Amino acid sequence: MEFLIEAAGLAKNYPGRAQPAVADLNLRVAAGEIFGFLGPNGAGKTTTIRMLAGILRPDGGRVRVAGVDLSRDPVAAKARLGYVPDEPALYERLTGAEHLNFLGDVYGVDRATRARRGGELARRLELADSLGMAIGGYSRGMRQKLAIIGALLHDPAVLFLDEPLVGLDPKAARHLKDLLRELTAAGRAVFFSTHGLEVAQGLCDRVAIIDAGRLIAEGTPEELGATPERAGSLEELFLRLTGGQDR
Ligand SMILES: Nc1ncnc2c1ncn2[C@@H]1O[C@H](COP(=O)(O)OP(=O)(O)OP(=O)(O)O)[C@@H](O)[C@H]1O
Ligand SMILES: [Mg+2]
């Protein structure tokens, strides 16, 4: 099996905090998989994603993206991944189109390809009519869509998204879910964090639950007790494992 995301012994301690934000995290995501990353507020999801995407340096452990070691060859590894942060930082004065052009330059995507791919994604996410507008005038959902398009412009093997459904309307959320399925059908890997347990149950090939920086469950939704007939079963497991309910 070809693993596009491999994390081994990943650890992060923020200065001044007694507990590690992430401790000895091990996971692998194969080509063709949508992997859902679940956990309570403050569990370490964003910290993990930032380390996997090469934004935050781990204190320990290794990350490989599409077979490339992130710390040894960060440029090559980052060329193979796309990252949609929870709160995209965008240049307010640029238009959406200028922002995508900037990213196209950074990632070395030729003009014809960026116009074709960016245009198609913008049409699908219904942002095409707003690409000429300054980002300062974008709504939260529009920013989210632009960040998603930008992360896919260079056709990465791996896409990381941090709570991508927050702020998207139901139609845009559907478009995004379809898009993620198409990416994995084409052999890519998708890793996203979410608080939407029903989405995770319905969309993900595998999920993991992190709590206080440690993985406490991992498997297919079915392995974790979720079946189509038992809607809400992942929620039960989550609440039981993370102590969100009387035990
Ligand atoms: N820059 C930082 N400096 C210090 N501590 C941090 C920093 N960022 C995160 N933390 C701490 O690390 C832990 C994990 O935070 P993280 O943002 O990774 O959680 P999360 O699972 O993404 O939560 P949420 O569901 O609220 O987004 C928390 O205890 C948080 O307080
Ligand atoms: Mg977070």
Image (cartoon, helix red, strand yellow):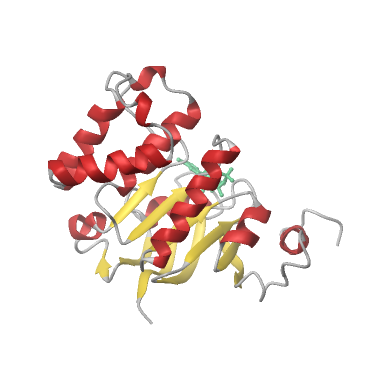
- Of residue 72 and residue 182, the one placed in the foreground of this image is 182
Most extreme residue toward the right is 246
Most extreme residue toward the bottom is 1
Residue at 53 percent across and 52 percent down: it is 193
**Quadrant of the rendered image containing residue 80:** bottom left
On the rendered image, what quadrant is the C terminus found in? bottom right
Residue at 36 percent across and 48 percent down: it is 83
**Quadrant of the rendered image containing residue 60:** bottom left
Camera sees residue 13: no
Point out residue 55 in the picture as x, y percentages from the top left corner. 33, 48
Horizontal arrangement in the rendering, residue 159 relative to residue 199 (left or right) = left
Point out residue 132 in the picture as x, y percentages from the top left corner. 29, 22
Residue at 47 percent across and 23 percent down: it is 139
- Of residue 162 and residue 26, the one placed in the foreground of this image is 162
* Residue 180, above or below 86: below
On the rendered image, what quadrant is the N terminus found in? bottom left
- Of residue 61 and residue 148, the one placed in the foreground of this image is 148
Point out residue 148 in the picture as x, y percentages from the top left corner. 39, 43
Count of numbered circles on the image: 0
* Residue 101, above or below 76: above
Point out residue 200 in the picture as x, y percentages from the top left corner. 61, 58
Residue at 32 percent across and 43 percent down: it is 120
* Residue 218, above or below 82: below
Camera sees residue 154: yes
**Quadrant of the rendered image containing residue 32:** bottom left
